Amino acid sequence: MKDYSISFDKYLKDFDYQERKDMKIQLPEFFELYAKGEAQLIDIRFNEEYEAWHIGFGDHIPLNELPERLSEIDKSKTIVTMCPHYDRAEIARLYLKLNGFNARYLTNGLLGVVEGLRGDKARDYIQKIKG
Amino acid sequence: MDELAREIVPSAMNNMRIEIDEFIELYNKKECEFVDIRVPMETKVWQVNFGLQIPANELPDRLGELPKDKLIVVACPKADRSNMARSWLAIQGFEVKYLSGGLLGLMDSLKGGLAKKIKI
């Protein structure tokens, strides 16, 4: 397989307006991509946080375990990283990007997901993705 | 970057960012340098009248402009690009944090008479 990984120096020097947009994904676009099976969602919080509460879809790989668990990530999909807000999701996104993945961070974070999927909206979306 | 990712533990999360009030305190004591890492077009529209302006993508070529003996605080409007710049600078060996709350938060906490809080 072709290696798409790039050095951090090169990534930073090439950082432009387009990449500034491409690095993030908003909820509506994420919901759509995920429902179409074109995105892999990764909750990158620590194990203890995940145990305390998590959402009913997507995967969980703690940020500090990413280097050892890259094989669990699908190179053919858009990888969407997520934490409560977006600070750690951005680190994870950057790490994955440098390792050749098409990764974006979820701007609204987990809190945005739970805010966006309340009541009937949760029902409708889960039905949509689980059939 | 592998090492940086692996070493992230819950108790160290606060070490990567600095809150606005703490930043102002350190800046007033001359114990940190402030770096606005936005692109030139953005800094042209509005700028902060203290610290340095080095766009993130120029950091690799302009490392020499950063002091090595004090904390570097990087900032962008919110906190995504500054977080990225922080990661890069941390890998280069700098003591660096990103400004939690970003430039927007900073402007908000330096409104009106509060602007006197920071010593320029």
Image (spheres, coloured by chain):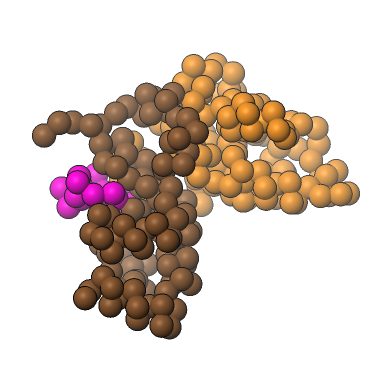
Chain colours: A brown, B orange
Residue B117 rendering spot, x and y as whole percentages: 81, 45
Q: At x 72% / y 43%, what residue is drawn?
A: B24
Q: Is residue A1 left or right of residue A90?
A: left
Quadrant where the image shows the N terminus of chain B: top left
Q: Is residue A28 above or below residue B87?
A: below
Per the rendered image, the range of residues in magenta is A61-79
Q: At x 64% / y 33%, what residue is drawn?
A: B42
Quadrant where the image shows the C terminus of chain B: top right
Confirm whether the magenta stretch covers residue A69: yes
Residue B80 rendering spot, x and y as whole percentages: 50, 44
Q: Nearer the viewer, residue A115 or B113?
A: A115
Residue A97 rendering spot, x and y as whole percentages: 32, 39
Q: At x 71% / y 33%, what residue is drawn?
A: B45
Q: At x 35% / y 53%, what residue is drawn?
A: A81
Q: Nearer the viewer, residue A9 or B120?
A: A9
**Extreme right residue here?**
B113
